[in-house]
Amino acid sequence: MSDAILSFSVDHSSGNLSFVQEFPAGGRVPRQFSINKAGDLLAVGLQSDGRVVLIDRDVKSGLLKRFAANALVEGEVTAVIFDE
Amino acid sequence: MAPVQNETFTLAEPGPNPDRQDAPHPHEAILDPTGEYIIVPDLGADLVRIFQVDKDGLTWTAVDPLVAAPGSGPRHATFLVTDDATYMYLVAELANTITGYQVEYESELTFTELFAVNTHGEGSSVPNGTTAAEIALSVSCLFFFFYSDCRSFHH
């Protein structure tokens, strides 16, 4: 069972948002997420599953593509950050 | 490290969603892009509280808050700075909306609402039990999350 991530593209000339994609978050209660500097990875902290997932992202289109990796973390994950 | 200043928020009466809005629930504190203001979305009070950072850089003074839609439950916000303008996007957990504002800095910080969309995009419906949560901005895209079932989760 998975909750969802929704993404929108931003028009820089107007600030307007357009809905782009709904993608599974990889588990339950995606409490927080981070994007790496390159913009090609999204890390999601799943609070109810005690898990972190990494999702490959296409930088040009902004689309999330596939789950790249995941790791179990003891306890309720509330934050996930990249060390770059 | 030593605390310099703290403030306790109060609410005269519960908001339109009394289960979740029985008291102020400041959900995060972020800086605006200039670093001169502290922005605190308050889910219980339906306000985005705003504090101007004092010259010493350590203390703050409250200024007029941004009033959010009643019962919407503001949770997180993020800023976008372009060559021409500054925007703020506010995620409301109870209403499942993203509201876009143009931000202007004159004698005070002002917000002009540009649009509000539901978290699943224009014209779509939001599944029951959904609660919108995080928001983050990569260079050209905006991301946010929702939970499809919040019944067992309280924060």
Image (cartoon, coloured by chain):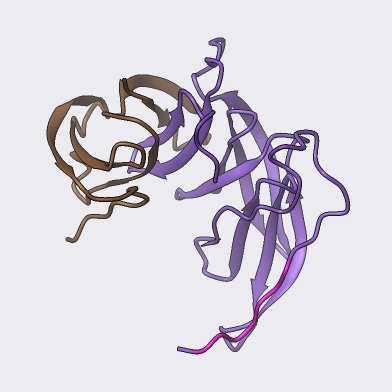
Q: Colour of chain B?
A: purple
Residue positioned 29% across, 51% down in the render: A80
Q: Nearer the viewer, residue A71 or B98?
A: A71
* Image: A2 above or below B88: above
Q: Nearer the viewer, residue A26 or B122?
A: A26
Q: Nearer the viewer, residue A78 or A62?
A: A78
Q: Position of residue A17 (x, y in %)?
A: 49, 28
Residue positioned 60% across, 67% down in the render: B37
Secondary structure mostly seen in the magenta stretch: loop
Residue B125: name its quadrant: top right
Instruction: For residue B101, say whether it is visible.
Output: yes
Disc tally is 0
Which residue ends up furthest to the left in the rendered image? A68
Q: Nearer the viewer, residue B116 or B154?
A: B154
Examine the structure image and report whether residue A55 is included in the region drawn in magenta.
no
Horizontally, residue B100 falls left or right of residue A82, namely right
Examine the structure image and report whether residue B3 is included in the region drawn in magenta.
yes
Residue A67: name its quadrant: top left
Horizontally, residue B11 falls left or right of residue A18, namely right
Q: Position of residue A1 (x, y in %)?
A: 31, 20
Q: Position of residue B25 (x, y in %)?
A: 66, 52
Q: Colour of chain A?
A: brown
* Image: B30 above or below A39: below
Horizontally, residue B110 falls left or right of residue B2, namely right
Q: Quadrant of the N terminus of chain B?
A: bottom left
Instruction: For residue B84, say whether it is visible.
Output: no
- Magenta stretch: give its range: B2-8
* Image: B74 above or below B31: above
Q: Position of residue A43 (x, y in %)?
A: 24, 43
